[in-house]
Image (cartoon, rainbow, N blue to C red):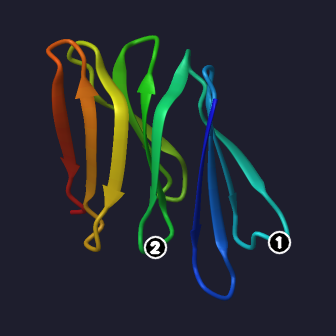
Amino acid sequence: MCYVLKKRGSMKKILISLICLSVMLVFIGSADADTYWVNSVIDSTGDVGGYTSIAVDKNNKVHISYFDYDNADLKYATNKSGAWVKSTLDSAGLVGEFTSIKVDPYRNVHISYFEATSNNLKYALRLAN
């Protein structure tokens, strides 16, 4: 089990926390860290949520990269459209462990991850447009 915690904002803190479980990926966020929490199950299809990494863009939208143990794939989830959308980014071999995600100032999403089939470091880029 792993926990990632990020704070963003000044007067009203926006607290984003990601709990990584072996059976599902769960997002917990709050518009005001002192008042309430909102829990969302993002992906519960099989054994997912390993090696998670989380980033929050300048519009306070969340981007998560994570490993799907059942399919050995790199997956990505975001709520930038207002609803959680998930997708498989790479499924060629054993890919997606040790993910790291970053959203740049132009809202481009950058993900680095390990591909164990050939022992390669890989990089994925999603342009904002």
| Residue density around tag 1, few if under 14, some if 14–19, many if 20 or more, within 10 Å | few
| Residue 10, horizontal then vertical, whole percent | 61, 86
Task: Tell whether 36 sits left or right of 68.
Answer: right
Q: Which residue is mark 1?
A: 34
User: Outermost residue toward the bottom?
Assistant: 11
- Return the mark for residue 59: 2
Label count reads 2
Whether the residues at callouts 1 and 2 have beta carbons within 8 Å, the answer is: no
Q: Is residue 56 above or below residue 101?
A: below
| Residue density around tag 2, few if under 14, some if 14–19, many if 20 or more, within 10 Å | few
The kind of residue tagged 2 is Asn
The kind of residue tagged 1 is Asp
| Residue 33, horizontal then vertical, whole percent | 76, 69
Residue under the image location 26 percent in, 28 percent down: 114
Residue under the image location 26 percent in, 52 percent down: 110
| Residue 49, horizontal then vertical, whole percent | 53, 29
Residue under the image location 53 percent in, 46 percent down: 84
* Element under disc 1: loop
Along the line of sight, the residue nearer the viewer: 71 or 95: 95
**Labels 1, 2: front one:** 1
Task: Tell whether 67 sits left or right of 74.
Answer: right
* Element under disc 2: loop
Compute the Cα span from label 1 to label 2: 21 Å
* Residue 46 picture quarter: top right
* Residue 86 picture quarter: top left
Query: Closer to the N terminus: mark 1 or mark 2?
Result: 1
Along the line of sight, the residue nearer the viewer: 116 or 48: 116
Task: Tell whether 103 sits left or right of 123.
Answer: right
* Residue 22 picture quarter: top right
